[in-house]
Image (cartoon, rainbow, N blue to C red):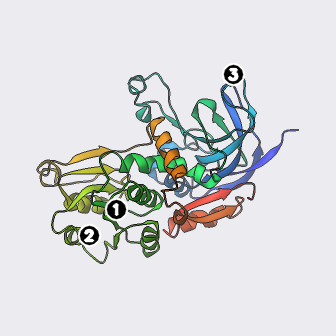
Amino acid sequence: MTEKMLAIMKTKPAYGAELVEVDIPKPGPGEVLIKVLATTICGTDLHIYEWNDWAKSRIKPPQIMGHEVAGEVVEVGPGVKDLHVGDYISAETHIVCGKCYACRHNRYHVCQNTKIFGVDMNGVFAHYAIVPAKNAWKNPKGMPPEYAALQEPLGNAVDTVLAGPIAGRSTLITGAGPLGLLGIAVAKASGAYPVIVSEPSEFRRNLAKKVGADYVVNPFEEDPVKFVTDVTDGAGVEVFLEFSGAPKALEQGLRAVTPGGRVSLLGLYPREVTLDFNNLIIFKALEIHGITGRHLWETWYTVSSLIQSGRLNLEPIITHRYKGFEKFEEAFELMRAGKTGKVVFFPHGH
């Protein structure tokens, strides 16, 4: 008789998800089965839960959700030699082909045939999950599971913040959602000053302060461009990091950055964005980086080292911890309302 487990599944093409009982999967060639110790909600998971236009175009229910994970290897599939039962791992959630033009130029983070856990296949919001062995990242034994699960999104924040020089640079961060909060932590750990955060949610502005932001501004009540101008004695910020995915925030940030400054864009926009490219970008000679995923595997080394250094202030970012999956709907609705930082599930209750 096949053993069963609980999983959060997108069962139909509509709003929401369901907690269902399914078979514990068996690892195939090149795969391992992990006991999920911790898994965290990402903005992508929220899009799937809400069933927005992107999700409608990409997701094929029924499918287990989730991709950010830390777990213990409990079974090893055929052909796996570098992992063993008992290994404590996280997972790079982008499965790359290794054969396309981008991969052959060592740009695995933009592989043209990428598949993603919980998006193109079953994910990790479950008691047990399958991970391709080539996507496993071994963790030090002492790293808390919630921190180990955070390494995947933290890699996005690291690539955003460290796409150029940051130490001693004045920095504007737009959006203090979970990724923006991680960005604040990385910027502060890397020596950025001052770090100014623009965020409309009072809950998240308070979190930004706890994580280390030097200034916070509500863009619905104050002009963030004027705020930045005042803080920087008229110069504007050297670095602009866009996490919000809000077109207005993008425009404000481009106005606030100093000529010759650096811009990193991670937020995804709900529609096409119209900008005054001449005056906001070209005549200002801005250096602009589009950020997607993480560099494989360079960023993972950076992330692991930053966590182990103790320099990252991650604890305020984790605002909700759930034992088991039973309250998953509450977790998603709180996240929708902007009343969370990072949300962690401990599937086995601890």
From the viewer's perspective, tell me whether residue 233 is left or right of residue 46. left
Mark identifier at residue 297: none
The spot of residue 50 in percent (x, y) is 52, 58
Circle 2 SS class: helix
Give the CA distance from mark 2 to mark 3. 55 Å
Residue, x 45% and y 73% (percent of image)?
206
Q: How many marks?
A: 3
Which residue was labeled with disc 1?
A: 174
Task: Count residues near mark 1 (Cα–Cα under 10 Å), then give few for <14, some for 14-19, many for 20+.
Answer: many
**Kind of residue at disc 1:** Thr
Depth check: give the residue in front, 52 or 313: 313
Which residue was labeled with disc 3?
A: 79
Of the numbered discs 2 and 3, the one sitting upstream in the chain is 3
Residue, x 81% and y 45% (percent of image)?
4
**Kind of residue at disc 3:** Gly
Task: Count residues near mark 2 (Cα–Cα under 10 Å), then give few for <14, some for 14-19, many for 20+.
Answer: many
Mark identifier at residue 224: 2
